[in-house]
């Protein structure tokens, strides 16, 4: 070294940073003439792997021509960028060392100076494209043929995901006859080895054909995974359209799992490995961004935030919300049911541990049961349309995947591979799943649903595949009695084709009865006539037409499009707390103890699960009003709705609240009445051993000492139906051993 200048032996090869590099124009457009400070920071943060995020929107804003060229030739530009950045990295490393000998450069490289001469190792820099502008975002399902070969961005929901497998990008063949290794053959376009052999042609040495075997451990291999991205369920009516995505970067594998939302930037290509003339576009991923868990990925203006705050202070906000999503003119009656569904739309905040595991869920579940034709399905449809990420299914339209998730085989590149496929519940993550006629689904599926509703996730394991799908989803479901009519004195097990464990997962259960009521019937008539005469006016309101500054309408509702965004804003920005020691904190405890104490030694009126549900409702009420803390008013609202639901759905044959009716499907008093009746039958069979059984009238007479007649009759009906009691034509009953 002479005069502080490194000798040629220690100097790495420094690239020429000139206009001969087309990539330099992009970097200059992106960062300005002196972008090395930005890249130095990247190098310092990750010295082992140099990854450069190229902001596409920033490039477009500075130079449209460069951006258009990049979109039309993405692979060429990405290759040039990676090559340039690899060489530039070597240049920067050399400059870091050289800066130690130059006072002027020391200012630019402060803190990065190397004291000892070094030979810069070869480095491999990679480029990822981020922040795609709307101009290159395509809709899933459109033919998009004009964009083949171009850089595109696709937004959607993960639908299926395969496992990771090594795939040959190029194949080196060995001749079976003369043992000569052939030049590598490109295989990135197909997984069919026979097609690659055909392209390889004849042996380079002996000129024989069809005599090749792939050489082991030779040729380029890449980790390969395929996923499918589909339209968000709320953007499609029945069958969401999908697009396949090939992922070769291991860092992106499993980044968007089924049910998760995200954006993929890549090159739109045509699948040529097919026997059909139909064009099947797919995306080869360059970068991938999953939406942050627990967030809706929506933006709100300052003006909107101010309007939301104004609406939250309205004294009749709850009534206005009900009038917006399920007004009397559409669905008459069911005021408490509507209010509870409105709270479900807002939900409460979920709590997580330091590792991100769910501790307590904030999303509620509600079940609507009872007579057919009582607006249960209509209410669930309206709620699904109101909330972000709303999904609706029924037993007739649900896909083969069903409600939760499954692992199944699917053809990928000509071979059968296991893939994880998301069902409706993970697809509605951070939203609401509306299930019509839950009783029509099979029990295995319902039991799987019950676990996911409680835990907030679904595990899928099959062969080499293992996936954990988020299901932070509120479920509102309907169910009809087996014989069509609800009977207050029969157990749920007898009336509904539902496993008992699913009833426990719902915070509220509402019973719908079709009974004659002159006032209600008149309101129903008004609603039905309105549906046939006022539809045009309703369409105008639903489409958000009119003055955008008008938030509250003359009918007492809130402008629909505004209210849907208000709900999203509340879910995104407001996480109210039940503050320890506050008046609301004490009110919740008082409510729990008061309801609990209405029970007795043989009957509980409420269980801890319902206590959690009570708090969720109170937190949802606070969130609806954009409050940071739960108030006593929120607790009172939750208590009123909980008691209203329990009185309807969990009252025993004597009119007392008994949570066992929801826990086991049968009330405690009925279970004891059944034991009482069977005991009397056996006693009377012994007393009347010369008769064909126990006289039924005498059985009822003795049982009436302890239970009301309707309870006894319900008990007898149950055990006669299930075979524990046999009734003869002569008025005798027999209890088989």
Image (tube, grey):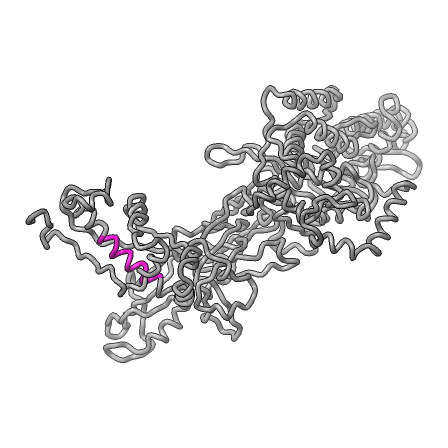
**Image spot of residue 1 (x, y percent):** 7, 49
Above or below for 710 versus 521: above
Q: Locate residue 660: give its quadrant.
A: top right
* The C terminus - image quarter: top right
Furthest toward the left, the residue is 2
Region in magenta: 78-91
Q: Nearer the viewer, residue 376 or 3?
A: 3
Q: Residue at x 42, y 52 (%)?
A: 252
Above or below for 240 versus 680: below
**Image spot of residue 501 (x, y percent):** 66, 37
Q: Locate residue 618: give its quadrant.
A: top right
Above or below for 735 versus 34: above
| Residue 655 appears in the picture as rendered | yes
**Image spot of residue 339 (x, y percent):** 73, 38
Q: Residue at x 32, y 48 (%)?
A: 38
Q: Main secondary structure of the magenta part?
A: helix
Image mark count: 0
| Residue 483 appears in the picture as rendered | no
**Image spot of residue 570 (x, y percent):** 61, 39
Please state if 555 lies on the left or on the right of 196 as rendered: right
Q: Nearer the viewer, residue 515 or 524?
A: 524
Q: Residue at x 13, y 46 (%)?
A: 117
Please state if 681 lies on the left or on the right of 52 as rendered: right
Q: Nearer the viewer, residue 399 or 158?
A: 158
Q: Locate residue 582: give its quadrant.
A: top right
Q: Nearer the viewer, residue 648 or 175?
A: 648
The question of residue 292 being in magenta is answered with no
């Amino acid at each position: 070294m002479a005069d502080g200048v490194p000798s040629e032996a220690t100097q790495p090869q420094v690239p020429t940073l000139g206009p001969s590099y087309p990539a330099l124009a992009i970097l200059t457009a992106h960062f300005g003439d002196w972008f090395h400070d930005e890249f130095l920071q990247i190098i310092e943060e990750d010295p082992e792997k140099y990854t450069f995020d190229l902001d596409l929107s920033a490039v477009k804003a500075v130079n449209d021509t460069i951006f258009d060229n990049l979109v039309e030739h993405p692979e060429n530009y990405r290759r040039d960028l990676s090559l340039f950045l690899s060489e530039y990295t070597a240049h920067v490393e050399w400059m870091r060392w050289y800066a130690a000998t130059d006072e002027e450069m020391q200012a630019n490289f402060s803190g990065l100076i190397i004291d000892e001469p070094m030979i810069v190792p070869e480095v491999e820099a990679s480029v990822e494209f981020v922040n795609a502008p709307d101009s290159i975002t395509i809709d899933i399902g459109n033919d998009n043929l004009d964009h083949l070969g171009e850089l595109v961005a696709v937004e959607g929901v993960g639908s299926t995901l395969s496992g990771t497998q090594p795939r040959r990008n190029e194949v080196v063949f060995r001749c079976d006859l003369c043992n000569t290794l052939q030049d590598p053959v490109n295989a990135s376009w197909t997984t069919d080895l026979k097609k690659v052999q055909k392209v390889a042609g004849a042996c380079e040495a002996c000129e024989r054909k069809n005599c090749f075997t792939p050489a082991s451990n030779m040729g380029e291999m890449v980790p390969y995974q395929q996923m499918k991205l589909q339209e968000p369920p709320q953007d499609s009516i029945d069958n969401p359209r999908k697009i396949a995505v090939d992922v070769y970067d291991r860092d992106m594998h499993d980044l968007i799992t089924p049910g998760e939302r995200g954006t993929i930037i890549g090159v739109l290509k045509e699948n040529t490995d097919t026997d059909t003339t139909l064009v099947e576009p797919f995306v080869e991923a360059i970068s991938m961004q999953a939406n942050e868990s627990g967030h809706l990925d929506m933006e709100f203006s300052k003006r909107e935030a101010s309007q939301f705050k104004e609406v939250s202070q309205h004294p009749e906000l709850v009534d206005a919300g009900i009038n917006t999503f399920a007004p009397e003119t559409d669905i008459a009656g069911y005021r408490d049911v509507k209010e509870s569904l409105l709270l479900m739309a807002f939900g409460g905040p979920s709590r997580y541990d330091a590792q991100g595991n769910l501790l307590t869920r904030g999303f509620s579940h509600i079940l609507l049961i009872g007579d057919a034709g009582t607006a249960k399905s209509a209410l669930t449809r309206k709620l699904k349309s109101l909330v972000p990420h709303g999904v609706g299914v029924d037993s007739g339209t649900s896909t083969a995947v069903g409600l939760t998730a499954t692992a199944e085989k699917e053809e990928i590149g000509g071979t059968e591979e296991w893939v994880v496929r998301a069902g409706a519940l993970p697809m509605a993550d951070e939203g609401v799943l509306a299930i019509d006629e839950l009783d029509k689904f099979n029990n295995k599926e319902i039991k799987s649903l019950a676990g996911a509703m409680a835990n907030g996730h679904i595990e899928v394991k099959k062969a080499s595949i293992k996936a954990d799908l988020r299901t932070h989803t509120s479920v509102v479901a309907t169910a009809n009695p087996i014989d069509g009519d609800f009977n207050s004195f029969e157990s749920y097990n007898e009336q509904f084709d539902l496993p008992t464990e699913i009833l426990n997962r719902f915070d509220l259960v509402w019973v719908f009865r079709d009974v004659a009521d002159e006032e209600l019937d008149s309101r129903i008539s008004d609603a039905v006539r309105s549906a046939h005469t006022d539809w045009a006016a309703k369409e105008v309101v639903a489409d958000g037409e009119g003055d955008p500054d008008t938030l509250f309408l003359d009918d007492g509702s809130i402008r629909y499009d505004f209210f849907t965004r208000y709900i999203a804003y509340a879910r995104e920005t407001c996480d109210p707390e039940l503050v320890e020691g506050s008046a609301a904190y004490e009110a919740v405890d008082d409510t729990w103890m008061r309801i609990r104490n209405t029970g007795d030694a043989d009957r509980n009126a409420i269980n801890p699960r319902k206590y959690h549900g009570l708090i969720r409702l109170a937190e949802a009420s606070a969130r609806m009003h954009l409050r940071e803390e739960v108030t006593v008013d929120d607790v009172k609202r939750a208590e009123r709705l909980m008691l209203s639901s329990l009185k309807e759905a969990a009252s025993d044959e004597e009119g007392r609240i008994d949570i066992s009716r929801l826990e086991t499907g049968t009330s405690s008093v009925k279970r004891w009445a059944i034991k009482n009746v069977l005991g009397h039958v056996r006693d009377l069979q012994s007393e009347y051993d010369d008769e064909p059984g126990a006289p039924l009238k005498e059985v009822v007479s003795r049982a009436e000492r302890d239970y009301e007649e309707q309870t006894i009759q319900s008990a007898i009906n149950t055990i006669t139906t299930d075979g524990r009691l046999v009734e003869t034509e002569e008025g005798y009953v027999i209890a088989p051993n």
